[in-house]
Amino acid sequence: MPTPSMEDYIEQIYLLIENKGYARVSDIAEGLSVHPSSVTKMVQKLDKDDYLVYEKYRGLVLTKKGSKVGKRLVYRHELLEEFLQMIGVKEENVYNDVEGIEHHLSWNSIDRIGDLVQFFDDRPELAKQLHALQEKDES
């Protein structure tokens, strides 16, 4: 299983490939706000651990394993954003809160949060009741 730092890189690489069709060291560095030399070191580690194939000066591609992990990490991030928005977390806090918690939850917890999000999606009247309660508490 990848470390939280490895997960951040895999997720960023997956998103870049999905959105641009490729991922360059400079794009990864910019997306993660790190130095390109740090990206190169991590990419080499991810290559060694079979999450991607990296050729110096040629670029990189995710392996099947890397793509599978990347897709799941993006799902986790999007699900947690949806969950926090659904429960009324202020929009300006959502991204940082997700970044703070996403590596600390088990996949079982992620799946249960997914169940809860689906439950509320299927019952919009309950979501409205929750938001009404929150508005009452803020008054």
Image (tube, rainbow, N blue to C red):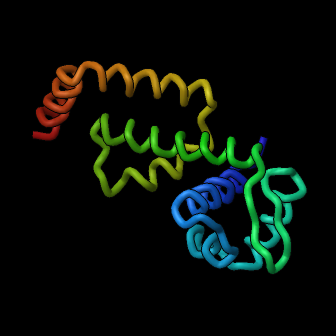
Q: How many marks?
A: 0
> Taking 29 as reference, is 17 above or below it?
above
What is the x, y in percent for residue 2? 76, 46
The C terminus - image quarter: top left
Residue occupying the point 52% across, 61% down: 19
Residue occupying the point 74% across, 60% down: 61
> Taking 9 as reference, is 128 above or below it?
above
Report whether 22 appears left or right of 110. Answer: right
Report whether 133 appears left or right of 18. Answer: left
Could you say which quadrant of the image residue 5 lies in? bottom right
What is the x, y in percent for residue 90? 28, 49
- The one nearer the camera, 63 or 74, is 63
Could you say which quadrant of the image residue 122 lies in? top left
Residue occupying the point 56% across, 69% down: 31
Q: Residue furthest front?
A: 21
The N terminus - image quarter: top right
What is the x, y in percent for residue 47? 85, 59
Report whether 69 appears left or right of 97. Answer: right
- The one nearer the camera, 76 or 139, is 76
Residue occupying the point 81% across, 80% down: 57
- The one nearer the camera, 115 or 3, is 115
> Taking 119 as reference, is 75 above or below it?
below
What is the x, y in percent for residue 62? 73, 55
